[in-house]
Image (tube, rainbow, N blue to C red):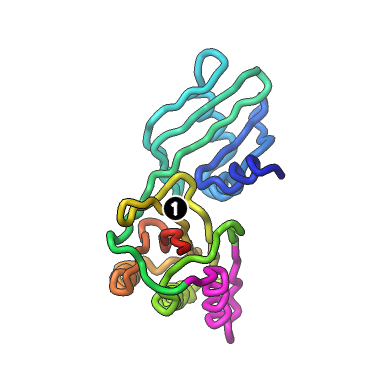
Amino acid sequence: MTFEQKWLEYDYNPFIVFNDKGKITSLNAEAQFLLGFTTAHELFELAKTYASINFGFKTTFLQLNYGRYSFFGLTVGYDNEEEIGVKLYQTPSYKLNSKKPEGELVNIYTIVDLCIASNSINSNILFEKEYDPTIPDVIIDSNKLIKLLNKIYTSCRVKNKQIKTRIFYRVGEHVKFDGKKYSIFSIEISSQNMQKEKFAEIKLFAEEQGLYIDTTKSLTINIPMITS
């Protein structure tokens, strides 16, 4: 896989290429998750609807929702009659505190794995992991993050056989501290039976720890990628 292909594979926005019969010939990781909430046929019809009349690329801004996904637009492109591609742009659903986080340089995977290990003791729950390997060590208060993660995992253990954890880079999204831009990555924790009545309590706890969590669809901690 080339460097350019890796960027596409780990793009936060879903990307799919179809042949002229509507069969998927290529897709990135985020598109695979999206297909858990819609069908290839529906996305193929969407691509045809918003394609340009002539060969080329066309971007359209509109509101689309599929399960936990919300999009503000899409680009459709084709340069022959045999294949067509579509990329959907996710709506940012988060904000970050204006104060630059303080703490120590830590490996985020180690922290998450530690919390998963402690919450899986004496449990039959399957802890599924989907990690983007490109996240570097970042500066964060590890004790506060561990407290928040443990609170989230505890809430997800009720009436669930599986808990999924994703760590992913939010391509093209950033936050500013002291005039300097920082990229953002997220830790998303989800389960089939989310205790939404606990979301407000978890969000308040996160704010008390100086962390921001999006509780719109799942539980997603958004963290600036500060490395020094």
* Residue 108 shown in magenta: yes
Residue 149 visible in the displayed image: yes
Name the residue that disc number 1 marks.
Answer: 183
Three-letter code for the amino acid on which mark 1 is drawn: Ser
Q: Position of residue 212 (x, y in %)?
A: 35, 63
The quadrant the N terminus occupies is: top right
Work out whether residue 106 or residue 221 is closer to the camera in this orientation and state it.
Answer: 106
Residue nearest the observer in this picture, 32 or 104: 104
Q: Residue 119 or 212: which is nearer the viewer? A: 212
Residue 16 sits above or below residue 122 on the image: above
Location of residue 5 with respect to 85 vertically, above or below? below
Name the residue at the bottom extreme. 122
Residue drawn at point x = 62 percent, y = 33 percent: 17
Question: Is 101 covered by the magenta stretch?
Answer: no
Percent position (x, y) of residue 32?
60, 47
The residue sitting at the top extreme is 54
Where in the figure is residue 61, as x and y percent of width and height?
Answer: 38, 30
Residue at disc 1, secondary structure: strand
Task: Read off the magenta span.
Answer: 105-129
Rendered residue at 44%/53% (across/down): 183
Residue 197 is at least partly visible in this image: no
